[in-house]
Amino acid sequence: MQKKITKLQAASALFIMLTAPVFADGGSGDHGVGRGSDGGDGSRSNPSSISGTNNHGTDKTYSTEGFIDLNNAFFKKFGTNDRTCATCHVPAEGWTITPKGIKERFERTEGKDPVFRLVDGANSPRADVSTVAKRRNAYSMLLNKANIRVGIGIPANAEFELVEADDPYGFASKTELSLFRRPMPTTNLKFISAVMWEGRETTLDPNSSDCIYGTTACFSPISLDLSTQANHATLGHAEALAALTDEERDEIVAFEMGLFTAQVKDKDAGNLTEDGAVGGPKN
Ligand code: HEC
């Protein structure tokens, strides 16, 4: 069968902007770690929970471990550009990032916080970031939409061909498209069935019994996908020179899988756990 030729315009192919289905539009500075937490005094002592504010009220995160372990590998630098997982998965911003939080970080650091890195924070890795004004311009997708540039090529099994790429930022091409995406929240992962927006970190395993009903499409456990995903994030986003060890991957995955976040207070409805209501992350 002849492949369908699809002309992908910049608007549709290169700048797919997705908004994370999260609660947060607020959050605090300091990457939201410590502040807003139950015992939150900005110190690195492990809080029993972490709160975030959002357009509708307040959300809260608990861990099945009993506390949020701020010394977990999730908060450590393994790369060359000062980033940790929490650079883009901010606890008090629904474990993602928000334009409000990103703008605060830009103003506080004049666009030098580790989230502002050419590799995937800028509209183009070739952008001029030599002055504050130029950085404001170069990181506009991040500042306005909290979007990170996911640079990937067309999958080998794609059902379309790219015949033209037109990137106003002068970078994207057939070999590396620029897909601008909000980081997905690294919480409530117990409930997911695929990893990443388009599921590209979801792997097949013919020996698994987790299959699509009536087909031979069977999948690895999510924990395995999250483990390779953590490694890819370290090599990509954090520009690490070496892969994570198995122990480091396991530590990150155990941490992520233990997190549960939900709204606890709604501006109109009030406390969502009052009078026998079963809102909040513990329920
Ligand atoms: C520079 C920002 C950035 C950093 C740093 C980062 N991530 Fe992400 N993360 C993203 C983006 C963007 C996505 C969505 C990408 C996509 O779907 O193409 C994402 C997606 C994820 C997902 C998928 C969740 C789901 O529901 O499918 C997990 C899990 C995750 N990241 C974990 C991590 C871990 C662990 C680290 C540290 C080792 C990390 N991230 C570092 C930006 C980042």
Image: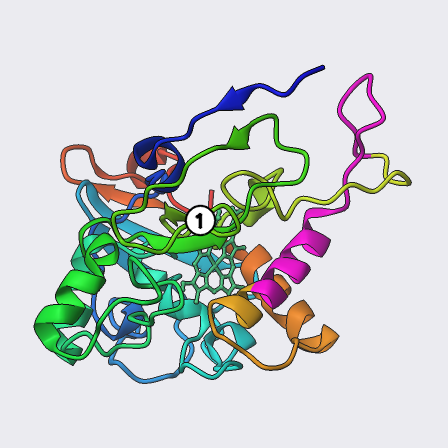
Q: Is residue 239 one of those drawn in magenta?
A: no
229 lies left or right of 277: right
Q: Which x, y percent locates residue 43?
A: 31, 85
What residue is shown at x 78% (from left), y 19% (from top)? 213
Q: Which residues are magenta?
A: 210-232
225 lies left or right of 35: right
> In the picture, which quadrant includes the N terminus?
top right
Asked whether mark 1 and ligand 1 are closer than 8 Å, the reply comes as: no
Vertical arrangement, residue 44 with respect to residue 50, above or below: below
Q: Which x, y percent locates residue 277?
A: 35, 33
Query: Which residue of the protein is positioned furthest toward the right in this rendering?
Result: 207
Would you say residue 4 is visible in this rendering? yes
269 lies left or right of 91: left
Please tell me which residue lies in front, 276 or 15. Answer: 15
What residue is shown at x 66% (from left), y 76% (from top)? 243
**Amino acid at pointer 1:** Ser
Vertical arrangement, residue 75 with respect to residue 136, above or below: below
Q: Which x, y percent locates residue 186?
A: 48, 55
Q: Is residue 231 one of those drawn in magenta?
A: yes
Please tell me which residue lies in front, 156 or 57. Answer: 156
Badge 1 element:
loop
What residue is shown at x 79% (from left), y 34% (from top)? 210
Give the residue at mark 1. Answer: 173
Quadrant of the rendered structure where residue 3 is? top right
Vertical arrangement, residue 261 with respect to residue 111, above or below: above
